[in-house]
Image (spheres, grey):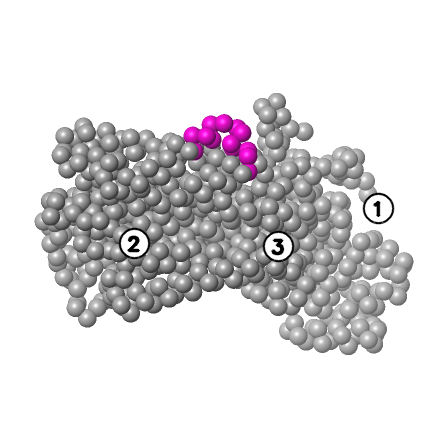
Amino acid sequence: MTSPYLPIKELGEIPLIEEGETFQSLTDRIARVTEDETPRNWYIAFGVALCFLSLLGVCVGYLLWQGVGVWGNNSPSYWGWDITNFVWWIGIGHAGTLISAILFIFRQKWRTSINRFSEAMTIFAVMCAGLYPGIHIGRAWYAYYMFPIPNQMSIWPNFKSPLMWDIFAVSTYFTVSLLFWYVGLIPDFATLRDRSKTQLRARVYGFFALGWRGSNRAWQHYERAYLILAAISTPLVLSVHSVVSFDFATSVLPGWHTTIFPPYFVAGAVYSGFGLVMTLMLVARLIYGVKSIVTTQHLELMCKVMLLTSSLVGYAYAMEFFIAWYSGNQWERAWALMRIVGPYWWAWIPMVGCNAVVPQLFWFKFFRTNLAALMVISILVNIGMWFERFVIIVGSTYHDFIPGSWGYFRPTMIDIGTYAGTMGLFFTCFLLFLRWMPMIAMAEVKGVIPAADPHNEVGPEFHASSGVSEEPEPAPGE
Amino acid sequence: MSNDDDQLHSKKTKKEGLDAAAREAMDRTNIETKSPANAKTDAMTGEKVTEKKKDPKASDRPALFLAEYKSPARCIHAAEKLRDAGYTKFDAHTPFPVHGMDKAMGLPDSRLGWIVIVCALTGTATAFLMMWWMNCYDYPIVIGGKPPSASSIASMVPIMFELTILFSAFAAVFGMFGINKLPQHNHPVFESDRFKSFSTDKFWISVEAQDPKFKLDKTRELLEKTHPEFVELVNHSGNEGEK
């Protein structure tokens, strides 16, 4: 019987999940990661991540004690690595929402193998990003001024400021991502609950599973909730990086004051997010033996998304230069020239090289399927995207309109330590996630294998007996 | 009678065996007399009867029938059968949402969208009123030469949008919890150990005793015609296995 779930062999399509995987084997493969004894390498990685997390604690503590002067931020560059890292981390998160929401709306079933993983990445990346606005304001204990709550000055936040929009966008993004992630996790927590060997596991997973019993009456509303969450997350994810770009675009600085920023930022965000998903997935699928679920086909499809977004970013780079020339604005022209030949030329090279040039290799199937190449390129993607944020932020602020207020931004050890520390925060959370939660959405992956299709009944004995079952009135007298 | 009472009582009767009154009560429930499948088991494993038919008072209150299927197709066919037979309080329990099951069960469309749209518009209105009240009414401030009035709505759009999304997301998730009555950690289906396979690879149908069409014998007969792997009657206090 033909089925929409089965790949069309004539078109060269191959199954999403390797053939031979059953509901049981998929569940075992994914749930086992959380059930088996913790591998020794996990402890080593977790220890390293914890070291970096402590580094973050030290750097942030020192910053709060001494003030923002411990960073390299100074006139004229009042934004340095702090906002660079903020934008970079937020951008990384975008891939998760793109995979979980936009690909869901487009019915891209291959997303099921990687969505849980990348949604987790989103949440931890947004946590890292959310740290920076709080600590870069100088007196962090006044961070509550950013929220619309009555304060001792009887003054309210200025809602015409893009920075306020940013607060709302990022906090909404974090909340919605968390809800989306949790809703997806409920059926999988139920699976872990039902497989638990110990009372404690059954209690803890049972608590989070909310008493899920796979009821179709519940699935019906669950699926609708999932669809609605996907539908609202789609404009949300586009809005978040657009609003982040408003922080720059609504100012009057050359290089920032452009209308191309929102789409350019969103494309870059998706691009960098896919880069990190790729890096982490390449490692995780080897270590945890989920190669049959996250196949080369998935990696190849991710490469294609990266190729598209890289080309969009490359187009935006070209358009920035074109508009700088075409505008006839001397400040814009000077900024564009300084980007290439100015003191920060060394940041511009990796930005263009890693973001616009290197991913063009993905036109070739060899690079899309070669794991070593993927590893290198996906890391280069994130290096390139970090430099893009840096070039945008410092590249427009270090040269003010008059030469008297030109400067040169240099990061301090605390800048570097804080950045490395957020990596520690990210990987600490991520390793805990890998250890204790199903890193692949079991319920969703099961739904895309051929056995899940009700029209694709397997096993000969069903067909033998189905003749009987289809009869309206089976013979009486059993 | 509370659940605890049931359990205490059932343990007691398990030890002592069934007395005459219990036997009589059992007859009233038709378990033995009318269900052919049951009669067979009774004949085959006469001794097991005392163990399985726990407390007669508990078996007066069966909670639901559970039937296990090994494929989504069989589960859907079973749901169709129950729907066509006029059952209303039955459910399918599947490891993932099975395509076509809503139709097979005869479920109406989810009304979650209505909850979400109401909350979404509440979010938009909340954002507008908050910004207008704070920046235009309570403490008017002029920024960038823009009037502190509702006419500067353009600058309010991003936050209005974000709160619309935020409120919708809460409505979608907590509305779904509300409709599905989650969290609900206690349910008769969990009394069955075998039912745990619902979250791995098996497909289950449950028929609740509250269903007006529910009859111990008829319902079992109907379920057994749908090619289940296993059928069991779950009481409020525990379960009775079969097949």
Which element carries disc 3, helix, strand or loop?
Answer: helix
- Badge 2: few (under 14), some or many (20 or more) residues near its Cα, within 10 Å? some
- Magenta residues (range): A359-371
Q: Kindly indicate the quadrant of the structure image that contains residue B32.
A: bottom right
Question: Can you see residue A236?
Answer: no
- Residue for badge 1: A478
Question: Can you see residue A46?
Answer: yes
- Please report the residue visible at 73 percent of the width from the left and 44 percent of the height from the top: B226
Does residue A18 appear left or right of residue A253 in this picture? right
Amino acid type at circle 2 is Pro
Q: Are marks 1 and 2 on the same chain?
A: yes
Does residue A32 appear left or right of residue B180 in this picture? right
- Please report the residue visible at 15 percent of the width from the left and 37 percent of the height from the top: A331
- Residue for badge 2: A411
Q: How far apart, in angstroms, are the residues tagged by discs 3 and 1?
A: 47 Å
- Residue for badge 3: A33
The mark that comes first in sequence, 3 or 2, is 3
